[in-house]
Amino acid sequence: MTSSTEAKNNRIIGASWVIPIDGDTHGSLLRAETATIHRDHGLLIVDGKIAQIAPYTELVAQAQQADPDIDVEFFADHIMLPGLVNCHGHAAMSLLRGFADDYALMPWLEQHIWPAESQWLNESFVRDGTTLAVAEMLLAGTTTFSDMYFFPEASAEVAESHGVRAQINFPIIEFSSNWASDTEEYFAKGLDLFDNYRHSKLVSVGFGPHAPYTVSDASFERVAVLAEEIDTHIQIHLQESAAEVADSVRDHGASPIERLHRLGVLGPRTQAVHLTQFNERDIELLAQSNTSAVHCPASNAKLASGYSAIKQLLAAGLHVGLGTDGAASNNTLDLFDSARLAALQAKLHSSDATALNATQSLHLATQGGANALGLGEQIGSLSIGKQADIIAIDTRQPGMQPVHNPISQLIYTQAGSAVNHVWIDGEAVVRSRELLNIDLAELLANTKAWRDKLAKR
C-alpha cells in the first residue's frame, strides 16, 4: 500500500468486502434475499467517478502499467459500499437535540420547537447547526442528505464548502418566520437560491412546502407550476399523523394525498415524507403519479405519529428511501440506525420475520434513497460511471465480529459507529474517523455556546 495524496483525482481503493448494491428496480428489491458481495476487490476512480471494479491485485497491476504513480490503498477487514443517502431531515435542528423529548407531534411543535425557533433562529444558528449535522452524518456514513429548513442559503453553503452532496428544499409556509415575512418572500428567496446553485456539482435546490396543514391551495399550485418550469424537486411532510388526515377530510373533503393530487403537486419530482397513514386510494394516486416516498422510522415512532407500511408502498412500485428526520425528533442522524429500525419495525408490524430483510433495508439506505431523490443515475451504487461516493466500515471491533454476513453486520449491529473512511466525488472527507474538512474543536465550541443560549428559555 502506498500513502495517499488526497488532492490526487485518480486512485484505487480496495477492501476485504465490496458491496456494490444490486437491484435498481422495484421487482428485484422486493425479491432480494442476498446481494453481490465481492471479496478483495477494488475500485478505480477517475475524475471523481468509478471507472472499474475488479479484483484488487488485478486492478492495481493493470492500472500501474498505465500510471506507475497512481495512489493505491487496500483496507483489510473493511466493508466498502456506496455512501448512504439520507432522504429527509432538518440539519440545523441538531442544536435542538434533546431540547424537547417525549411529546406528541403537535405539542412538540407548537409548545417547544416553534417558540425556540422564533427566539433563536438566524443564519448563524443554521450554519452552526448544519455543520454539526454534516459532521455527524459523515462520521456515520451519509454522503448525501436532503434538507428542509429556514435560512437554506446557510445549509447550502455548509454542504458545498465541506464537500458534501445535498438536496436543499427551501421552505414554503403561510406564516412569517425569522427568514421570511410572507409567502411571497419565501418564494422569492428560494428561487434566488435555486439560481445561485444551478450549476453546483454537489448542491441542488428545490421546493419544501412544509405540510398540507401549513400551506394553502394557491401556494401548492404555484409550487407545482414552478417546479415543472425550472425542473426541480418538491419535498413535503405528508400524512404524518391520523389527526392530519382527519382534519383534511373535515376541511377539504379529501385526504391530503387526494388534495395534492387535485392541485397537481404529486408527480415524479415529488417526495412524500412520513406517510404513516394511507389507504388503497392514496397508494393508487401515489403510484399513478410516480411520487416517491421517504420513510422516517425513528421520528415516526418517537413522536407516536404512526407506522409507514413501506412494503405496501414498494409493492405498488414507488421509489422509497429512508430519512432520519431532524435530531430534535430522532436524536441521531445515523442512517444505519434508521435502516435497522426500518427492518425491525417491518417485521413487528407484519408479524413476519422475513419482512424487509437486511439486503432490502440496505438498498433503501443507498440506491433506494438515491432513486427517491431523483439522483439514481448519479449515486446509490458502486457502478461504473457513477460518482465515487464511497464509505468503508471497519469490522475490527467486538461488536462487529465475527463477520458471517457483511450485510447483516451493516444493518443489525452499530455499523454507523464503525465508519472509518468516506469519499465524495472520489475525494476523502473522512480518514480513520477524522473529519478532514471540519474543525472539530471549533464546531464543539460553537455547539456549546448555542446550548448555553438555548438553556435560557
Image: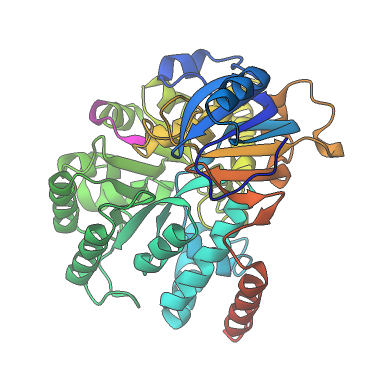
Name the residue furthest right. 398
User: What's drawn in magenta, residue-wise?
Assistant: 288-292
Q: Residue at x 55, y 31 (%)?
A: 67
Q: Where, quadrant-wise, is the C terminus in this rendering?
A: bottom right
Residue 52 sits above or below residue 184 on the image: above
Image location of residue 430, percent across then percent down: 63, 51
Here the colouring is: rainbow
Which quadrant holds residue 455? bottom right
Q: Position of residue 384 (x, y in %)?
A: 45, 24
290 within the magenta span: yes
Q: Is residue 359 magenta?
A: no
Q: Residue at x 58, y 46 (%)?
A: 298
Residue 59 picture quarter: top right
Which one is nearer the viewer's eye here, 415 or 311?
415
Residue 23 screen position, x and y as percent: 47, 18
Is 28 drawn above or below residue 251 in the view shown?
above
Quadrant in the picture for the N terminus: top right
Residue furthest bottom in the image: 456
Please name whichever residue, 41 or 34, is drawn nearer the observer in this view of the structure. 41
Q: Quadrant of residue 21?
A: top right
Residue 158, given in percent of the width and then of the height, sits at 45, 64
Describe residue 209's horizontal placement relative to residue 65 as left or right.
left
- Number of numbered callouts drawn: 0
Q: Nearer the viewer, residue 447 or 337?
A: 447
Residue at horizontal 38 percent and vertical 32 percent from the top: 376
